Image (cartoon, helix red, strand yellow):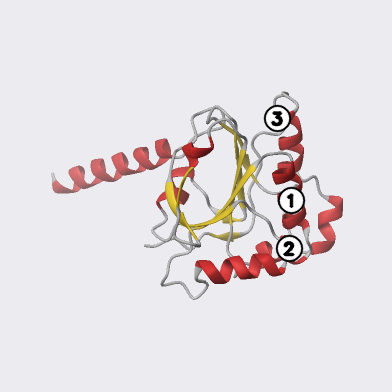
Amino acid sequence: MMLRRTFALSALALAFSAQAAPSVGQAAPDFMLKDASGKTVKLSDYRGKHVVLEWTNPGCPYVRKHYDSGNMPATQQEAVGKGVVWLAINSTERASYEYMEPAKVVAWQQARKAQPTALLADEDGAAGRAYGARTTPHMYIVDPQGKLVYAGGIDSIPSSDPDDIKKAVNYVRQGLNEALAGKPISQAVTRPYGCSVKYKA
């Protein structure tokens, strides 16, 4: 009896976690996180604008590929220049050897000329789990009505080699350009790639 009950509870937990991660076309989960200066930021504060969510971790070689090459900063600058809000989210738990204080992550980004609207700390992993973020980077686009319209990778070549960037399709740039032009995103779901998110157990 106890085993059956435990199994039922486990199945319920699995069903809940599967439901928790939204699909493209559904409402993007709201969240409330602090930026590097301690200011509280809510996704719903940006209703009326397109928002890019970027899961990041400077300890990941795939993240470093896109930052050190200038690809992520250039994509950010282009998006922000068009009025898009760009929120970089770090869900790395404090106990991880890859954890970096938010102010240090900001300094790391700024040294690479990165310009996200904000860097947000998600140390308990609640926001990351709500979106089903699996990798760094893992990218999402939310439309002005608060609906998720893109989920997946930064681009089409899943490697840590910077030389592949120029040959790849930048899915975020492509998706934003289509969305801003009032068109449906042609590749709205792609495969994310990178390092696993170092969530709190």
The amino acid marked with disc number 2 is Lys
Which element type, helix, strand or loop, lies under badge 1?
helix
Give above or below for 1 relative to 104: above
Looking at the image, tell me whether mark 1 or mark 3 is earlier in sequence order: 1
The amino acid marked with disc number 1 is Gln
Farthest-out residue, left:
1
Residue nearest the viewer, comparing 199 with 6: 199
* Disc 2 residue crowd, few under 14, some 14–19, many 20+, Cα 10 Å: some
Query: Label 1 to label 3, Cα distance in Å?
Result: 17 Å
The amino acid marked with disc number 3 is Ala
Rendering quarter of residue 83: top right
Rendering quarter of residue 9: top left
Q: Position of residue 88 (x, y in %)?
A: 58, 54
Rendering quarter of residue 185: top right
Q: Which residue is mark 1?
A: 77
Identity of the residue drawn at 36% across and 38% down: 15
Looking at the image, tell me whether mark 1 or mark 2 is earlier in sequence order: 1
Identity of the residue drawn at 69% across and 49% down: 154
Residue nearest the viewer, comparing 57 with 42: 42
Of badges 1 and 3, the one in the foreground is: 1
Q: Which residue is mark 2?
A: 113
Side of 194 where 98 appears, left or right: left
Looking at the image, tell me whether mark 3 or mark 2 is earlier in sequence order: 2
Give above or below for 41 relative to 159: above
Which element type, helix, strand or loop, lies under badge 3?
helix
Q: Position of residue 60 (x, y in %)?
A: 62, 67
Which element type, helix, strand or loop, lies under badge 2?
loop
* Disc 3 residue crowd, few under 14, some 14–19, many 20+, Cα 10 Å: some
Q: Which residue is mark 3?
A: 179
